[in-house]
Structures are given as structure tokens and as C-alpha cells.
Image (cartoon, rainbow, N blue to C red):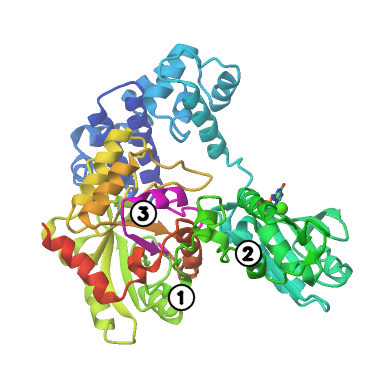
Amino acid sequence: MARANEVVAALLDEYADLLSITGGEAFKARVYDKAARAIGGHHADVATLDLAALQKIPNVGKSIAEKIIEYFDSGQIQAIEKLRAKIPPGVRALTAIPGLGPKKAMILYEELGISSVDGLEEAIGEGRLAGLRGFGPKTAENLLHGIELLRGETGRSLIDTAMAVAEEIVGAISAVPGCQRCTYAGSLRRMRETIGDVDILAAARDSKPLMDAFVRLPIVAEVIVRGEKKTSVRTTRGLQVDLRVVPLEAWGAALQYFTGSKEHNVRIREIAVRKGLKLSEYGLFRVGDGSLIVSETEEDVYAQLGLAWIPPTLREDRGEVDAALAGELPDLVTLPDIRGDLHTHTNLTDGVSTLEEMLATARARGLRYYAVTDHAKNLPMQRMTDAKMLKQREHLRALASEGRMELLHGTELNIDPDGDVDWDADFLAGFDVCVASVHSHFNQSPEELTRRLVRACENPYVNIIGHPTTRQIGRRAPIDADWDAVFAAAARTGTAMEVNSYPDRLDLPDELILRAKRHRVKFAIDTDSHSTVHLGHLRFGVGLAQRGWLTKDDVITAWPLPKLRTFVARKRRAH
Ligand code: DGT
Ligand code: CA
Ligand code: CA
Ligand code: ZN
């Protein structure tokens, strides 16, 4: 992208923001917003274009073209300068807080003189928002959380970062002579979305060689405490790792204890107490004589309590203990169950690997079918055209005869602010499968967002809603829609909700998966890969799906291809 295009796009973007902050017509703000994106993604340098050529750029009308000329002639745009004079720059910065739209930012400025993120934080702390209409205690709390998100202060690591560290350490400790068992426990074993610290558990008669090896690992930056039973370190990237070493006889109990969650353990301990047993990280004991019941495996521990072994991903005290008591634990979907990926990109849009590279890696990973779903044409940054899409399809069809993995041609459509998508029915009918996602206008009202997602579900060609909440962990809050209404529409129309495996998305989040499942929605565990290495993220999507209690039947990417094709065909036929 030419640098001039970026500058102009940023100016128009600012103008759109300022228009919405000052309560100008929403329509006008949207026009400038669209123009900004078109110019940002335009192939030619806008500094070299005249009035007529500028107006040939999609979404650029006469008035916008004139403003661009004005900018190159005088170095500024009067209309923007006027609005800038009315609104301090800090107010625009406020709108970067997830969940704080332009209208509310303006109220904060006009009523309380708040013109910076720090100022807002201070005002909330001093209770100055109380009494301001539309800013109840719940809103204040959400805003504080939004500020935290904006600053990335939550102090938790993404699961892929934590997993890489854990696997490296488990590998190293397992290789130490005398190590009888070693694995990771804690939130990582439960596949929580983010990880506070990594808990490694090992079994050995003598802990010293293991602790010695642990503190000498190259990724260790600092030893926080060193002990015989437990050593804690901080890695070079700031992640805390605890290593605990237990005798083999206590392995089952210790693994159960340190896997957690705390809430799950509380429930389990209650059951132990009722049975005259005492459960701790040191083992399972009879209360009467204090004798140890050897429990080398977790299965032993759960069996002694009259329970089936509970998969770690369920251990959040969300009904799993009662389900285990009743023998009704779900038969969770597993990684080997996954047959296909229905959301992937190539370097035709914003991916970095070629089609051939993506396919070769997917094949090597054992997938049975694979959909290429590059971005559709309404995201100007992606520079997609009808012709490019058709050419890719032809290319893919020519490759389809090679190998055992079946190839599908799809696309990731953009759900626009009204719920429409990029192409008309005729063009959409040419795809084997379509994902549709929200990529902009995250601050619409809950009513608008709900209507938008419901309309997307009602499109006969939309099979999967991609990364439904659009959250980016630590960076962007989830959009605020009426999810029950969206899930009801998804179930009714035969539209799957995505379980996006990308570590900073993990979207739907587990709580929403559980809610969607109650509506009998189907799910697509996808990687949303933009490079061959991302195909390895599938395990995180499966972990997330398990946390949402999903079985093979719930997950369309675990279905055989003919069943998936029927799912697509039935929705198209119904309209
Ligand atoms: P994190 O690190 O915040 O992502 O979450 P966890 O679950 O890994 O928590 P962590 O590292 O504090 O403790 C690991 C496990 O050890 C936890 O899941 C359950 C167990 N645990 C730790 N402290 C307690 C406790 O005070 N009571 C009980 N019942 N279990 C505990
Ligand atoms: Ca932990
Ligand atoms: Ca810990
Ligand atoms: Zn997307």
C-alpha cells in the first residue's frame, strides 16, 4: 500500500469517528468509513490521482474526492479541522475502549470533562460516574474491564504460548534419570482459554535431580522459590512455571488435585468426606486410621469415589460431577474425530502460504476434507474480485483429482452492518461452503448486532458464522448481541456456529458454546489458518469444544463429507 493512501485512509477514518462522536448522521459516518477502507486497499497511489480518477475508487464520491485533493493541495482538510477543534483527541481515544461507543464517549466529555483513558479510570475510581444517565455500576465495571483489555493488563498468557513452554519443560524433565512420570496440570490441562501460570507435575523418589535440571533450563530467567516439593520460576517471557515432585504412589491424587479447578476439587472433596475418605495432593486417605489408599492413576481416585474418570476439560463445576455420578458424562469430541477444516486462507488474500502449501500440510495432518475460504470482495484490504475467486476455484478443481483429501471451494463472507454479505445468490451458489463473519462495526447496538447476525443466519448460502463474538483475547472485547436470539436463528436455519481454534480468538467462548448447544446448534471447529503452522491450532479448538461439552455429533467438521454436503444442500433447498 502506498503511504499516501494510508495517510488519507487514516484521515477519513478519523473524520468518520468525529462525525459519530459529535452525533452527526450515522449514515455519513459510514460513508466515510467505507471510503477510508477503499482507499487504504486501493492499488494506485492516491497522491497521483485527479478528481475524476479518485471518484472511480469504489465508495469515493465527489465530496470525498474533493477533500482528498484539498489535503494534497493544502496539507489539511477544513471539515476535519473544524471537528478537531470541537473535540479533544483524548475523546476519540476513549472510543478505543471495548464497549465504549462514540455517543457515550461524548457524554463523558460533555458531562464530566473526561478526555483521556486515564481520566476515565480515575473518574470511575472516584465514583464520579454515579448519577450519570446510562452509566450504572455494571457499566462502570464493564468500562474498567474494557480499559484493562485495552492495556493488556490481565496478566494471563495465551494457550499456545503456555503450551509451548509446558511441552518444552515436560520434555526436558522427563529425560532426567529418576523421573518416573511428568506432565502438565492446572488450567493448561483443562485447556482454559488463557493461562495464569503453568503447573508441571513429576513423580520421582528423589526430587533433587529434577529441580536441578528445572532451574538450569535456558528459558528460565529467574528462580522465584526453590524447595524439595515445589520450585517456581519465571521464564524469559515472563510466564511463571511451578514444578511439583511427588512420590509415584501419590501420582493419581496429586494429578487430580493440581489439575483443578479449585471449584471442581471442592465438589470432589465433599464426595470423599461423605465416604469417610480424605483427599489431598498427598493422596487419598481413610479418615479412621489415616491409611493411604494407593492411587497411582486418576482413574483410581475417581473410582474410589464412585465416579467415572472426568475429562480435565470438564472440571469446572458446571455439572460434571453430577453427570459422572449419574453415569451421564458426554462422549466428548476428540482431535482424531476431526475430519475437516472449513475456514482457511491462502496468500490470495491475507494468508502467507500458497494454496499448494496449505493443502500439503493439511493432508500430512490427516484431514479428509479441506475448504479454502479466502476473504470475499467487500473487504477492500483483501483486493478480492469475482475473477480471482473463479480462477482459484478452477485451480482447486484441477488439483482435486490428486490425493485422498477432498477439496472444497468456499469463502469467508463479510457480514455488513445490515446483515448482508458480499455476493448475490447466483455467485454464492457456486461455492461448496460459505463462512460469514463480522469484521467491522463492532460498536453497533445490541439490537443492531443481533439483527445483523440473525439475517446472516437466514441467508441460504451462509453455512457457518465465523468467530461469532469477534473478540481478540486481551485486545478486543466480544460484541454485545442477544446470543439466545442468534443461536435460536442458527438452529432454526441450519447454520453452524464456529469454534475458532486461533489462540487469541477461541471463539465461541466455552460459556457461549454451552448456551448454543442448549438451542441444538451445530458447530464447526475450524482453524482460520493464515499459514501452514496455524493448522496445528486445531487441538485448541477441540479443547474449547470439549469445555463446551460437545460430542462428535454436534460438530460438523467431525462428520463424514456426505453428511456435511447434505447439511449445506438442505439449507439451500429450504429457501
Ligand atoms: P491459572 O493458573 O490461574 O490459569 O489456573 P489454575 O487452575 O492452573 O490455578 P493454580 O495454578 O492456582 O492452581 C493449580 C491447581 O491447583 C488448581 O486448579 C487447583 C489446585 N489448587 C491450588 N490451590 C488450591 C486451593 O486452595 N484449593 C483447592 N481445592 N485446590 C487448589
Ligand atoms: Ca496454573
Ligand atoms: Ca500454579
Ligand atoms: Zn474472519
Pointers 1 and 3 in contact (CB under 8 A)? no
SS for tag 3? Answer: helix
Residue at image position (38%, 68%) is: 552
Question: Which callout, 3 or 2, points at the residue further toward the start of the chain?
Answer: 2
| Quarter of image, res 297 | bottom right
Specify the quadrant that holds the C terminus.
Answer: bottom left
Tell me where residue 97 appears, x and y as whole percent.
Answer: 48, 33
Q: Determine whether 114 is above or below 366 in the image.
A: above
Question: Which callout, 1 or 3, points at the residue further toward the start of the chain?
Answer: 1
Residue beneath disc 2 = 302
SS for tag 2? Answer: helix
Q: Is residue 510 magenta?
A: yes
Residue beneath disc 1 = 336
The CA distance from mark 3 to mark 2 is 27 Å
User: From where the camera sits, is residue 341 visible?
Assistant: no
Q: Which segment did they paint magenta?
A: 502-528
Left or right of 363? Residue 44 is: left
Tell me where residue 3 appears, x and y as whole percent.
Answer: 41, 47
Tell me where residue 462 appears, x and y as whole percent.
Answer: 23, 57
Residue at image position (22%, 60%) is: 385
- Residue type indicated by callout 1: Pro
The CA distance from mark 1 to mark 3 is 22 Å
Query: Badge 1: how crowded within 10 Å, few (<14), some, or many (20+)?
Result: few
Tell me where residue 109 appears, x and y as whole percent.
Answer: 46, 17
Q: Is residue 486 magenta?
A: no
Which mark lies nearer to you, 1 or 3? 3
Which of 129/400 is in front? 129
Q: Tell me the number on the disc at residue 517.
A: 3
- Residue type indicated by callout 2: Tyr
Left or right of 421? Residue 239 is: right
